[in-house]
Image (cartoon, helix red, strand yellow):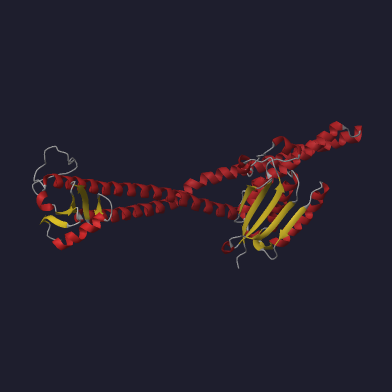
Amino acid sequence: MGIVRDSDQFSRLRLRFIITAAGAFSIALLIICATINLWNYSLISQQADSMIDLIHESGEVPSQPPQPSSADTSDLRITAETPFQTRFFTVAVSKNGDFTVCDSSHIAAVEESEMVAIAPNILERARTRGFYESYRYAVFDEGDSLTIVVLDRSSDINAFESFLAVSIAVCGACALIALLLLVPLSKRAVKPFLENQERQRRFVTDASHELKTPIAIISANNDLIEQINEPNQWTERTRAQIKRVDELIRNLIELARSDEPLDQRTCSTIDLSRLALSATDAFTPLAETDGKHIEREVEDDIVITGNADELERLIGILLYNAIKHYEGTGPLRLSLHHSKRRTARKAELIVTNPCSNLSNDDIARLFDRFYRADSSRSRGTGGYGIGLALAQAIATKHGGTIRAELGKGSVNFVVILPFARS
């Protein structure tokens, strides 16, 4: 049985490691790919804008680098072939809104009628620079008119799209290769963690069992002293501490075992509604002894799959915790119903008790092992800060979750458990 459990836990940890590592690597690749392509797009835009500024200033494309001027051409590589490779046209817009083609001699793929049709679409964008299809444009205010310079960048756009497709394909291939490598490597990565966890579990279990012997001897000696000299305050205090240590040992053993995955052979279909009612009946005398009342609202026929003893332990922990830390006035309340999200097919168990001394920081740490929001109070009531950690472990093993929420003068412990598979 231990081999089965270790194998299940090993598989889950491997899967979690693979998903986490592959996800992180994929995100890094995505960021790198996006950064490179954005930089490439920005470079294309800057070069096009520099060329447009140069055309607007000189009215043509020079065959050699121009002299320093107001147009920034530092990112351009101009050669004798540049005038023959650059395709552009310019359109003037008068105050009356008339469009006039000023220069169409440097482009053959666009008719003058198309140029006049493109210009209004550019002006409607309310941006002085940008892309219109495969053209880069800029609008210059000449005072009494507007000049639109439109530069054909189809070759650059095609190159950009090709590079984008290739970079996405390369990143996808790298992510796939990383995933294939992570599958065998994950065994080495996860194995030391599991071995260390198993050592800790064995240490806690073995140490707890070893402590039972001296505790039993101390208890027997204390009984013998009481038989010889009659019980007194010293033997009674010793007995109380023996009981406290014995309970702590049992909790430590149970806590160590809680890390083990759920053994499917101990699972069955459970009527959680009946289990909740039974647990409430069991804790009602304890609550009434302290002058408290437990209200319950349980829907019928809520069925889940799990270990009945552990689920009963989970409900018992929450009820005992609610009774022990009851503060203020009002009833304790246990409710069990279908999750508000009907499509989730989950059961929602809520245990509520009046409580006024918890803060948001306490709520965030309530399920930490050995954490007690009020150490002196918990120590006085026999608490160890283990119960809620056990409850969380049980809920997790059953594929559910547990959380604590602060209400108006109360604290709610909400457990979500999946329904039995039909």
Q: Is residue 237 positioned above or below 106 on the image?
A: above
Please tell me how many numbered marks the rendered image carries.
Answer: 0
Tell me where residue 168 appears, x and y as whole percent: 32, 54
- Residue 51 location, x and y as percent? 17, 47
Question: As drawn, is 166 to the left or to the right of 302?
Answer: left
Q: Report whether residue 210 is seen.
A: yes
The answer to whether residue 217 is visible is: no
Quadrant placement of the C terminus: bottom right
* Picture residue at 91% right of the left edge, 33% below the top: 228
Closest to the observer, 371 or 5: 371
> In terms of image quadrants, where is residue 212?
top right
- Closer-to-camera residue (82/13): 82
Q: What is the x, y in percent for residue 218?
A: 80, 35
- In-image side of 191 versus 172 (left or right): right
Give the image location of residue 247, x and y in percent.
Answer: 74, 42
Closer to us: 182 or 271:
271
Which residue is found at the position 28% from the left and 52% from the top?
Answer: 126
Residue lying furthest bottom: 422
Quadrant that contains the N terminus:
bottom right
Direction from residue 221 to residue 92 in the image, left or right: left
Picture quadrant where residue 152 is located: bottom left
